Amino acid sequence: DSGVTQTPKHLITATGQRVTLRCSPRSGDLSVYWYQQSLDQGLQFLIQYYNGEERAKGNILERFSAQQFPDLHSELNLSSLELGDSALYFCASSVLGDLSYNEQFFGPGTRLTVL
Amino acid sequence: QKEVEQDPGPLSVPEGAIVSLNCTYSNSAFQYFMWYRQYSRKGPELLMYTYSSGNKEDGRFTAQVDKSSKYISLFIRDSQPSDSATYLCAMNTNAGKSTFGDGTTLTVKP
């Protein structure tokens, strides 16, 4: 158990809908990362927050947004969902927001299915 | 072309074999190199992390980085059935963004 929690574990929804995925980092970790893992795209970095501020941005669609709250939990909002958004969404956390390297601890993921 | 290319696999070996997992990359700005292990339906977990060219050993695992060839490898000695998983290479620039390979699925048969 990495200490990172994600809810819900599974989510099934329809095209055009909006969903919110939630992540609680390990105790003491200030940085949160979101990743998307689909069968044909591998693990794709979406966005990083450090202590409430956006720190780095990857291949995140405009339909997706995220935020990190004062208690350091984070939410990833996915809107106008398309079939291709079906994937595993992972949250990871780390102690620092160091723009070089620090070990990331991954949560168990949320499996999103868009029908 | 992807910045990070990983040997796709899948790989199936008998217990006790030496396993070699490989990635190549094109971005010379990558400075930090990681290997993650991902069991089915679980989140990735960090196995090894290296910064410079050369070898780094941790038990049965050796990570090798050759920056001049833009090539990294993970060797697993005396492989065990519990090593069966998907292995992901990952790389960071100084800007902190991680780029992952697509993963190689390894099965170690008893």
Image: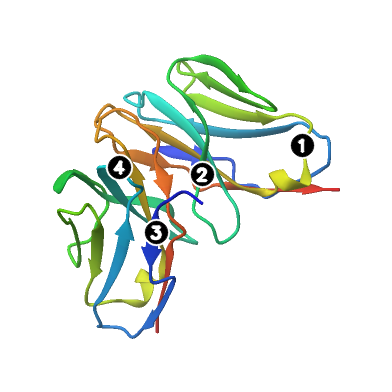
How far, Cα to Cα, is label 1 from label 3? 31 Å
Q: Is residue B1 above or below residue B62?
A: below
Q: Amino acid at mark 1?
A: Ser
Q: Secondary structure at mark 3?
A: strand
Is label 1 or label 4 in front?
Answer: 4
Q: Secondary structure at mark 4?
A: loop
Q: Chain of mark 4?
A: A
Q: Amino acid at mark 3?
A: Thr
| Residue A100: quadrant of the picture | top left
Q: Residue at x 70, y 43 (%)?
A: B83
**Residue where numbered disc 3 is placed:** A5
Q: Secondary structure at mark 1?
A: loop
Numbered tag placed on residue B79 in the rendering: 1
| Residue B47: quadrant of the picture | top right
Q: Residues within 10 Å of mark 2 (few under 14, many from 20)?
A: many
Disc 1 with disc 4 on a shared chain: no
Q: Amino acid at mark 4?
A: Asp
Q: Chain of mark 3?
A: A
Does the residue at mark 2 contact the one at mark 4 (Cβ under 8 Å)? no
How far, Cα to Cα, is label 2 from label 1? 18 Å
Numbered tag placed on residue B45 in the rendering: 2
Q: Residues within 10 Å of mark 3 (few under 14, many from 20)?
A: many
Is label 2 or label 3 in front?
Answer: 3
